[in-house]
């Protein structure tokens, strides 16, 4: 599958090691839509391709946001992009947060670190179709206040009626008067209706496992807990074999899974 | 509807006619020949390239050729390389990318040439099953691999029944041979080599309209009931000669229930992580990509090449590989091949060809490993 | 002055405690209030109370070798703070500072220790409640140790990239 050139409209830093690129199609015509939780393969000229979740608003498919952490060759090349530069884009790929199935439910978003990026399109969707959902809880864990993604937006979301937002950091600073501690500890005090709630979790696997356990202790069934998996991906077409976990091609059957479908493999080591 | 069944006899000394017919139709014949003291598949010019009078002796960690007492052309078991390299090339240019002065990118397809018409001569039943498996991988999913699809569409298959099983063969266990079965794995023509007091000849059976048309162009004669009986006896004998066996009943479940079995560490202690087994396996399909840039910096290419789950960087992510230990990588290979493949593609990923056993430098035998996992 | 018993009864830490025990505990409790920045406890000082947070947020910290205090964890309404009163030498092991205005119940450890020794049933019940909190805090601290969000998705050390 050939990439299509998209133009960098804007680029800004989010934190010391993360940045966001806003891409727009370089060709006229309706850009393909995407669903919250899906990812694109972004090609940086000469450096290669990387699977990157979409972090923008699904109602604005012509403005494709990717929040990226600089961790390797490709992401570092993407970090050097300037407005007007082009990247190759293939996608969107993969499963999405089941926003339609979740209509009428209370939503609990739990993000760890950069995990807020793949969740943000779902949050945008839920806020845009606010009446379709019950209460919205957004729980965010970050390494430190300086590592917190979308801090201004997080503050704004707090002001929306029916939205409850809590942020916790692993390492506080003198100026920080929010929570310090792991994100899982935000869960026990939550009043929640386990029969009518759904959780959407994104973060490191171990964080998702502990979060899922904390939610199950509150009575949430595994089928109502959704997680997103991450693996090395080369093709995004279920052909290259890299992203497999057990029988799952994460690029195709994932990245978003109901916990009951992936729980067995999520608890195995080195699979 | 079952494919048309037409059976005829082609004498050994007229086999070149088959090459001539295929060449006239524009096919390059890919078939077995002796090179570097091994039987390999490659482009053949003539029937004289076939490995006349040679057979292979595959064993765990060992492969030898030896002379046969007769002049059989297909007296070996399987060639060392599988047919996958013609359908799923080892290296393939995916695209070229150019960047102009304004930072605009232009992509050009890397593989837009029409693939050559290939005739696979001598593909065994296990190998047809392997091709059928890769068909499901590359053609049967959400996405079709266009590179595989166009090559596959241009292939004519002349299957060969096995007159002999090797020490590492276990197709009977995998229900993939030794006789080719056109209802399960379509072929254009099948060939059974008959070599007895009555002479050296081939029983040919058409499995497609193309196969029937080929037969029409060949100097064939009618088959006798004695020859049909001889062919059946030969295949029954082969089926009883399997050098290895694998109990598949409940195997997938057993493996997934034993992901922490001590055997994984024991086999990992022997495994060199050389990836040989994945390279010779006719169903292993994993690839990686390489990006190269011209020295001027205005042109880049993206290449795909075979990869292996035994490579440490196969599961590389920021922070390290997901499968760091040799134990986890061997476990991934075997559980994928024999267990999770079923859920993904509706069959085992193993066809019982035995290549991974003979080409393992330390003689790791997957039938033995699978058996060991059944013991608590 | 109104009795603190209803307040004690409503606090999650004492959920399900029987009336007799509650009455006993009420005798050891008093209302306290801390302004932001004010210490609830100081490392090394005598630990003769523990706190049940009713409102507000407190930070549990350790004096940093480079000066200042490193916050390990914050605690909120419904949380309990302090178990040093249970074990000799009864000294606080951490700093606890009010982040926002804190309303809490302070329970007198000296008085409680005596009651627990005299009534092992009460002592065991109280010990179970503290143990559960300690186990949860320990698990959370272990998770924090991983430095999850920096290390990437792996819970094992990683070699250099190839």
Image (cartoon, rainbow, N blue to C red):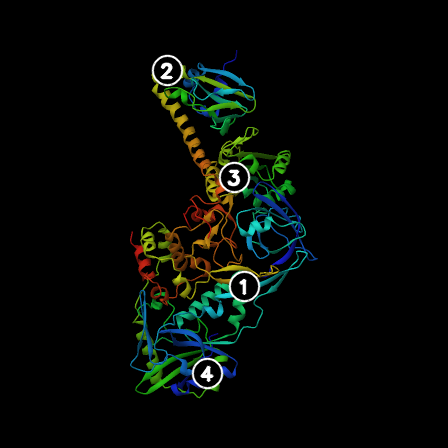
Chain for disc number 2: C
Secondary structure under tag 3 reads helix
**CB of mark 4 within 8 Å of CB of mark 2?**
no
Tag shown at residue C114:
2
Across and down, in percent, residue A200 comes to: 54, 43
Q: Dots 3 and 4: beta carbons under 8 Å?
A: no
Q: Which mark is residue A195?
A: 3
Choose between C112 and C151: the one closer to the eye.
C151
The part of the image, by quadrant, that contains residue B101 is: bottom right
What residue sits right under mark 4 in the picture? B19
SS for callout 1: loop
Residue C160's spot in the image, x, y percent?
45, 49
Kindly identify which chain the residue marked by label 4 belongs to: B
For mark 1, does the 10 Å Cα neighbourhood hold few (<14), some (14 to 19), or many (20 or more) residues?
A: some
Instruction: Mark 2: give few (<14), some (14-19) or many (20+) Cα within 10 Å.
Output: few
Please state the chain letter of the residue tagged with numbered disc 3 in the rendered image. A
Determine if residue C137 is in view: yes
How far apart marks 1 and 2 lie (CA) works out to 76 Å
Label 3: few (<14), some (14–19) or many (≥20) C-alpha neighbours in 10 Å: few
| Dot in front, 4 or 1 | 4
Where is residue B265 shown, x and y percent of the image? Answer: 33, 52
Q: CA distance from mark 2 to mark 3?
A: 45 Å
Query: What element does badge 4 sit on?
Result: helix
Q: Marks 2 and 1: in contact by CB < 8 Å?
A: no
The image shows residue A64, relative to residue B145, as above or below, that is above
Have a look at marks 3 and 4 and say if they share a chain.
Answer: no
Q: Is A150 on the left or on the right of C90, as rendered?
A: right
Disc 1: which residue: B144
Q: Is residue B260 above or below residue A151?
A: below
């Amino acid at each position: 599958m050939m990439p299509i050139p998209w133009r960098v409209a804007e680029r800004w830093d989010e934190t010391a090691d993360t940045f966001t690129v806003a891409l727009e199609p370089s060709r006229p015509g309706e850009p393909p839509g995407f669903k919250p939780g899906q990812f694109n393969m972004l090609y940086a000229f000469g450096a290669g391709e990387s699977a990157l979740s979409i972090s923008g608003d699904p109602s604005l498919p012509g403005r494709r946001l990717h929040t990226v952490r600089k961790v390797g060759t490709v992401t570092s090349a993407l970090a050097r992009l300037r407005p007007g530069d082009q990247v190759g884009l293939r996608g969107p790929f993969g499963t999405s947060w089941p926003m339609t199935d979740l209509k009428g439910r209370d939503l609990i978003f739990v993000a760890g670190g950069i995990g807020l990026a793949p969740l943000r399109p779902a949050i945008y969707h839920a806020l845009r179709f606010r009446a379709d959902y019950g209460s919205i809880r957004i729980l965010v864990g970050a390494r430190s206040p300086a590592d917190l993604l979308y801090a201004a937006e997080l503050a704004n979301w707090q002001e929306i009626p029916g939205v409850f937002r809590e942020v916790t950091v692993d390492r506080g600073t003198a100026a920080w008067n929010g929570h310090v501690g792991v994100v899982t500890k935000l869960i026990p005090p939550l009043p929640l209706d386990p029969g009518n709630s759904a959780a959407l979790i994104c973060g490191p696997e171990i964080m998702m496992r502990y979060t899922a356990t904390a939610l199950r202790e509150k009575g949430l069934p595994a089928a109502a807990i959704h997680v997103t998996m991450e693996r090395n991906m080369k093709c995004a077409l279920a052909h290259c074999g890299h992203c497999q976990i057990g029988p799952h091609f994460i690029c195709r059957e994932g990245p978003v899974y109901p916990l009951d479908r992936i729980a067995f493999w999520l608890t195995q080591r080195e699979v | 509807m079952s494919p048309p069944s037409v059976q005829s006899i082609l004498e050994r000394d007229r086999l070149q006619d088959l090459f001539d017919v295929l060449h006239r139709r524009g096919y390059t014949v890919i078939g077995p020949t002796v090179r570097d003291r091994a039987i390999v598949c490659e482009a053949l010019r003539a029937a004289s390239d076939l490995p006349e009078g040679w057979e292979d002796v595959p064993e765990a960690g060992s492969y030898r050729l030896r002379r046969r007492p007769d002049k059989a052309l297909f007296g070996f078991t399987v060639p060392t390389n599988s047919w996958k390299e013609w359908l799923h090339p080892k290296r393939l240019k995916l695209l070229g990318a150019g960047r102009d002065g304004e930072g605009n990118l232009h992509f050009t397809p890397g593989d837009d040439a029409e693939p050559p018409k290939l005739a696979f001569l001598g593909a065994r039943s296990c190998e047809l099953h392997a091709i059928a498996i890769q068909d499901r991988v590359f053609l049967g999913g959400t996405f079709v691999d266009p590179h595989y699809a166009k090559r596959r569409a241009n292939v004519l298959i002349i299957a060969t029944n096995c007159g002999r099983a090797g020490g590492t063969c276990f197709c009977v266990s995998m229900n993939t041979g030794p006789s080719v079965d056109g209802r399960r794995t379509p072929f254009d023509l099948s060939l059974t080599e008959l070599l007895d007091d009555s002479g050296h000849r081939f029983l040919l059976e058409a499995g497609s309209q193309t196969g029937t048309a080929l037969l029409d162009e060949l100097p064939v004669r009618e088959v006798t009931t004695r020859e049909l009986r001889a062919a059946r006896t030969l295949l029954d004998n082969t089926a009883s000669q399997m050098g290895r066996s694998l109990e598949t009943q409940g195997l997938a479940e057993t493996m997934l229930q034993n992901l922490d079995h001590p055997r994984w560490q024991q086999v990992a202690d022997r495994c060199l992580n050389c990836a040989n087994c994945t390279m010779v396996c006719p169903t292993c399909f994993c690839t990686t990509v390489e990006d190269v840039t011209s020295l001027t910096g205005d042109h880049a290419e993206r290449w795909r090449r075979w990869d292996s789950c035994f490579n440490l960087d196969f599961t590389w992510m920021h922070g390290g590989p997901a499968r760091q230990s040799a134990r986890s990588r061997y476990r991934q290979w075997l559980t994928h091949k024999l267990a999770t493949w079923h859920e993904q593609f509706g069959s085992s990923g193993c066809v019982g060809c035995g290549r991974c056993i003979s080409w393992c430098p330390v003689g790791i035998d997957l039938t033995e490993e699978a058996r060991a996992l059944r013991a608590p | 002055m109104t009795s603190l018993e209803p307040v004690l009864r409503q606090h999650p830490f004492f959920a399900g405690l029987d009336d007799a025990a509650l009455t006993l505990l009420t005798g050891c409790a008093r209302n306290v209030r801390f302004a932001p920045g004010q210490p609830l406890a100081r490392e090394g000082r005598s630990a003769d109370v523990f706190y049940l947070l009713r409102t507000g947020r407190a930070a549990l910290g350790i004096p940093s070798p480079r000066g200042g205090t490193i916050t390990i964890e914050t605690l909120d309404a419904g949380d309990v703070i302090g178990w040093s009163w249970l074990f000799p030498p009864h000294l606080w092991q951490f700093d606890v500072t009010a982040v926002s205005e804190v309303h809490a119940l302070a329970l007198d450890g000296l008085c409680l220790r005596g009651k627990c020794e005299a009534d092992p049933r009460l002592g065991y019940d109280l010990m179970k409640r503290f143990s559960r909190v300690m186990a949860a805090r320990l698990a959370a601290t272990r998770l924090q140790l991983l430095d999850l969000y920096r290390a990437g998705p792996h819970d094992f050390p990683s070699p250099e990239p190839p």
